[in-house]
Amino acid sequence: MSLLVFGHKNPDTDSICSAISLAHLKNELGVEATPYALGEVRKEAQYALDYFGVKAPKVLEDVKIQVKDLSYDKVKSLKPSDSVLNAYNTMIEKGTKTLPVVSVDGKFEGIITMVEIAKSLMYQHFRKVNIPLENVCYNLKGEVLVQCNDVFDGRVTTLSYGMEEIMNLLSEGDIAIVGNRYDIIEYAIDTKVSLLILTGKATLNDELTALAKANGVTVISVDVDTYTASNLINQCAEIEDIITRENLVLFNENDYVDDVKETMLSTNFRAYPVVDDNSKFLGLVSRRHLLNPTKKNVVLVDHNEFAQSADGIEQANIVEIVDHHKIGGISTDLPISVRVSPVGCCSTIIYNLYKENNVEVPKHIAGLLLSAILSDTLIFKSPT
């Protein structure tokens, strides 16, 4: 995890330049570090930054633990066009009863649950279904013989009766399932069903193929029997219509864990979706993830007291302090590196760190260090 390097609140030139310079040194030594400011950069510091062509550090509001600091679950998501069967198989594979659904561009759409899948399978028999050709081919191991459409919305009919019963049953636009009964196949094509599923790898001759194309009938041959196909066809429907979108509780990755705890205490979900500022789905967070959060690793420069530091500093992991002030009342859970020297400017200590680590000081960093020294010592006239 990257180090956050920052000075005190209401930052002066030394606080800003020290943070930038120490972060640069850390990066040169192979440690990822980013400088921050705990407030708006003052005009004097901004002048030095502009003069030496250095971008001002971003303002850090606080270092409280956020959702993005948790090791929440990065789970597989589904698309609204995925089939019910695919959703069910994924849940069985992952050992879960809930999965997120995201759009093609990754935005959170809702969730799909095992309960909704069960309801859909119970009430979809003998009703119209909306199924994409892709789902039928995938779930029934199908091969397209004639393609006239990509999506089908019709009543599912299994043609396992005699011709007389079928003539009274079959209608234009139906989704028909039949084996190698070619008189029935020809009748179904003449009736202009929308999709004809041939089971047991049955095929079409040239005459029937031409007739299907002329009547706009899509025909696929599947590698399952009629009984299996009739049982699985409803499960080829898209999950679009059974996605739960209402009354959901989700968190932004920037939400504070303290607020998340309060929400979880007042709700009763197994897991909660996590999204970014663009509503892109990131994962699922649950109560167990709150037990051992990953604290932000911070380095304090030009101060060493909680009152002068970032809000939420007690929730952060302080790994280092570089300062030239008196020791305040700060405490840490683990041993840390502390460099405190009685000099007129914190940047003086940081320059010494460059020398001790044999790291060359580039011109722009040298300029910032010198600017901080001149500012903090009042051009060497300060009592310090």
Image: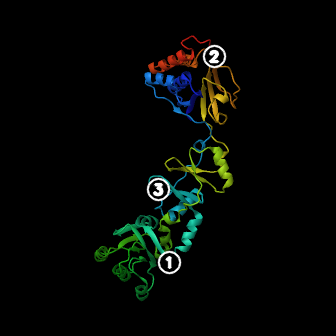
Is residue 92 visible in the rendered image? The answer is: no
Sort mark 2 into few (<14), some (14-19) or many (20+) by Cα contacts within 10 Å. Answer: some
Q: Along the polypeptide, which appears first: circle 3 or circle 2?
A: 3
Q: Residue furthest front?
A: 43
**Which is more N-terminal, label 1 or label 2?**
1
Of labels 1 and 3, earlier in sequence is 3
- Give the image location of residue 204, x and y in percent: 33, 74
Q: Is residue 299 above or below residue 176?
A: above
Q: Quadrant of residue 171?
A: bottom left
Estimate the x, y position of residue 256 in percent, counting from the top left: 61, 43
**Residue position for label 1:** 126
Number of the front mark, 1 or 3:
3
Relative to 329, residue 139 above or below: below
Distance from disc 1 to disc 3, alpha carbons, whole Å, reads 29 Å
Near-viewer residue (208 or 19)? 19
Residue at x-position 49% and y-position 73%: 228
Q: Nearer the viewer, residue 165 or 249?
A: 249
Q: Crowding near pointer 1: few (<14 within 10 Å), some, many (20+)?
A: few
Q: Amino acid at mark 2?
A: Ser
For disc 3, the marked residue is 103
Viewed as shown, does residue 328 lie left or right of 171? right
User: For the point 53% across and 53% down, which residue is it?
Assistant: 76
Question: Of helix, strand and loop, which one carries label 1?
Answer: loop
Q: What's the residue type where badge 3 is placed?
A: Ser
Give the label on residue 341, or none.
Answer: 2
Helix, strand or loop at label 2? It is loop
The answer to whether mark 1 and mark 3 are in CB contact below 8 A is no
Q: Quadrant of the N terminus?
A: top right
Residues at marks 2 and 1, CA–CA distance in whole angstroms: 82 Å
